[in-house]
Amino acid sequence: MSLKPKAPHPLGTCPECAEPLESGDRFCGACGYDLSAAAPQPDRPTVPIALPVDWPEPPPRDPASLTTATQHPGELPGTDSGGRDLPTVPVRTDEVPAEPVVPAEPVVPAEPVVPVEPVVPAEPVVPAASAGTAGTSAGDGHGPGDSDEGANRDGAEDGDGDFTLPAPDPRAALQARGQARETAPAAAPGDARKVCVACRTGRVDRDGYCEHCGHAQPRERDHMEEELSCVAAVSDRGLRHHRNEDSFAVASAALPDGSPAALAVVCDGVSSATRPDEASAAAASAASAALVAALPRGTHPQQAMHEAIVAAAEAVNALAEPAGADREHQNAPACTIVGSIVAGGLLVVGWVGDSRAYWVPDDRTSPPARLTEDDSWAAQMVAAGLMNEAQAYADERAHAITGWLGADSYELEPHTAAFKPDRAGVVVVCTDGLWNYAEGADDMARVLPGDASARPLHGAQVLVGHALDGGGHDNITVALLPFAVPSPGAGSA
């Protein structure tokens, strides 16, 4: 065995596992990496030129040639695009003599041209009647006094033998647009469908596309806002979903004693179910209608909320289609629901699922509170003492709901609660598309504007904007109900 050290490998170590290499290795002994694929490139550094530079003398120059290294056109034969030989022109290095002046051919006067009226004449057409208008066509629109510049604008030949294209006429574009409108299919008499926002001629079909130009139309539910004197709500599709599967309903009613009542219902469609947008819309509409009908009859607000959730569940169940072979693996339409009633000094909330209600007092020195408990995996883990709230909601299963409205839900268990706040404030009713970005009650109070009681619509818009600024990963819906402490002596519900 020779004790002479071996020369190092050019790579030093394996690029894949950093194992030291030996000279001559073609594969890494540890991981089997092909070292030839990572062969080092030779270093070719830029070497500065030492000054002064001793340049060689140039070769002698032939006076009859441009330079001794120049090739003439005749020495570079070629063909044009049609396969014909290119002409060869001798190159001269001496002074080129002036070309002899060739007398111009006599101009033959043109026959009088009968003018043809153009479709949209820019100027009156004057017939050519003198020798100065020879070569003018009947339709170019030029008279005896027109200059060459005017002829070039119409595509005539200029003095150098080149042709220039005419400038586009904007009247032609207007005429073409008018023809397009004339060829668009006419709407049938009594057609109440919407007109396309893109072409303004075609009608929008049931799928939301223009029958004429094919453009997709913006959906009405992509962004919705509604404001009453005592409640306001905003819903937005968000930045990631292709449609808005949330829905809401706001309304006001009068109690038997004449005092006002405000209500809001917010629903979130379950994306894994079929037609979740229809489920949320049906639930919100049914619950609102049930509340508006029950409160004036003197039904206690908490009982009215319970009955409204039951009515919403029945409306969603009615959307389910009969089971069949083609629907064996489809879930029935489903959604969550949360609602609130403010009436006669009483604050009532009801919910099923993970949509929430928060209480934020106008006096921000007072603590806010969350009024609902989620029907979710995370809430069950916290309630069982298996995880704290931070651990549970950090889990990927946190938003798996355990309660919802739908034909395939478990036993319906509406949750209701009633409160009597002793100070003014705002009730925030929202889906998880908002509270994902303001989960705690303190977070929600920090985001809600201080004048939300006086401007509920503006407050709802600010909350939706906060969720959009945070990423807008889900549909976002929020309703705000200002709560005022009743004056002494006022009746209660």
Image (tube, helix red, strand yellow):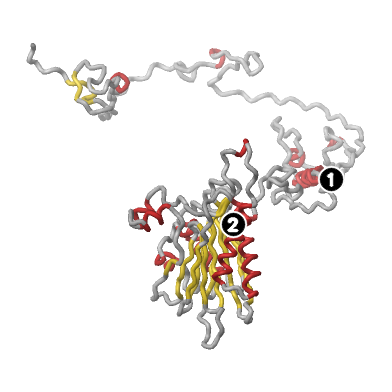
Q: Position of residue 65 (x, y in %)?
A: 49, 17
Between residue 262 and residue 117, name the one nearer to us: 262
Tag 1 residue: 120
Left or right of 136 on screen, residue 441:
left
From the viewer's perspective, tell me whether residue 406 is left or right of residue 160: left
- Residue at 41 percent across and 56 percent down: it is 379
Q: For mark 1, give the secondary structure.
A: loop
Badge 2 element: helix
Q: Is residue 237 above or below residue 415?
A: above
Real-space Cα distance between discs 1 and 2? Answer: 67 Å
Q: Nearer the viewer, residue 374 or 411?
A: 411
Looking at the image, residue 87 sits to the left or right of residue 395; the answer is right
Identity of the amino acid at label 2? Ala
Could you tell me the amino acid type at mark 1?
Val
- Image position, residue 266 (x, y; %): 56, 61
Of the image marks 1 and 2, the number of the one nearer the N terminus:
1
Q: Quadrant of residue 257?
A: bottom right
Residue furthest out toward the bottom = 489
x and y, in percent, of residue 328 in the image: 59, 38
Residue 464 visible to an observer of this rendering: no
The residue drawn where x is 78% and y is 54% is 192
Q: In this figure, which residue is indicated by the disc labeled 2?
A: 313
Marks 1 and 2: CB-CB under 8 Å?
Answer: no
- Which residue ends up furthest to the front in the rendered image? 411
